[in-house]
Image (cartoon, rainbow, N blue to C red):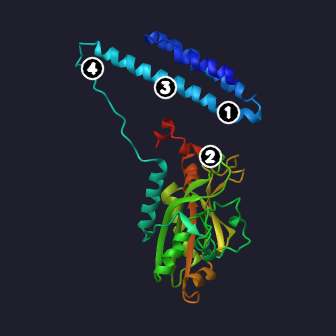
Amino acid sequence: MIDKIENIKADVSAYKIPDAETLEQFRLKFLSRKGLINDLFEDFKNVDRTQKGTVGKALNELKNLAQSRFDTIKEKLEKESSKGSSIEDYTLPGRTYNTGTKHLITQALEDITRIFERIGFKVAGGFEIEDEYYNFDALNTPDYHPSRDMQDTFYLDSEGKGKSYLLRTQTSPAQIHVMQNQPPPVRIISPGKCYRNEAISARSLAMFHQVEGLYVDKGVTFRELKGTLDYFAKEFFGKDLKTRLRPSFFPFTEPSGEMDVECYLCKGKGCRICKYTGWLEILGCGMVDPNVFVNVGYDPEVYTGYAFGMGIERTLMIRHGVPDIRMFYENDIRFLKQF
């Protein structure tokens, strides 16, 4: 197959393209769906596994060469055509340019931030590289918890550093940093990127965005947590939205819960998106575990608090009915222009 690729590469380089008609013939022969290069990609699946690396590299080089030659000659022919036109029609409409917009995820982060700022939350930054203490130990995550395994977390080469460093798996470490440096009351949200060693699929990514929230003071109750989350859900998804809380478990909260919203597709009747439950989970939450307060120097006999965290991409999938989480990062202009 390498010989076939080299022969086509030589043909691409030697192909004479004096005009637009010949350029189109070049495109049809090499770059179209029925062209020679596409046929090679179809045959690639039959290549022996030991040869796939070499053949794949050669195939990509061939495609890039053909595309580069096509683009270069097309640009040259267009310039020559414009130079040959000496008459301009000033009555024609002027050129229009598309205005840029913020990415859907950026818009969502700003919307969520504004919603919580209206009820007194401040934004706290964090670090995308953390050590195990802030990402796990201070958050009451035991050594045997599966989230600490290599297959779930991206650990960094920390040899000789004295600590084990990793790409944070959640934005919760920002809460520990804030509580260590600020006495109660604390009322913050922490938006940012997180990383987990996940298989890429329609429902999961290895890099994603989260927003964590924390409120600590004297006499904070679960009832306040429920009211805060219900307020957020109705502001973000719509006033008519139905929500519910379910019991759950997280190492850093006790009791813990998860909030569901009514499925956007079936309106609660049950479908494949909601696994025929009528509900979609949007966030985890709970009352801060007393052990977390001890780790940051707060007296758990005096202070109580609640925490919550949500994944932005999955929340947006529910909000806008997006079927595949990968669409947020494919940069398909047809998708992005809808928002």
Q: Report which residue position mark 2 lands on.
A: 265
Mark 4 or mark 3, earlier in chain: 3
For the residues bearing labels 2 and 1, Cβ distance under 8 angstroms: no
Q: Report which residue position mark 3 lands on.
A: 68
Mark 2 or mark 4, earlier in chain: 4
Q: Report which residue position mark 4 lands on.
A: 92
* Mark 4, secondary structure of its residue: loop
Callout 2 amino acid? Leu
235 or 41: nearer the eye?
Answer: 41
Residue at image position (52%, 70%) is 174
In this view, 289 is above or below 198 = below
Kindly report which numbered mark, 2 or 4, lies closer to the viewer in this rendering: 4
User: Could you say where residue 267 lies in the image, as x and y percent from the top left?
Assistant: 62, 49
Disc count in the image?
Answer: 4
* Mark 3, secondary structure of its residue: helix
For the residues bearing labels 4 and 1, Cβ distance under 8 angstroms: no
Kindly report which numbered mark, 4 or 3, lies closer to the viewer in this rendering: 3
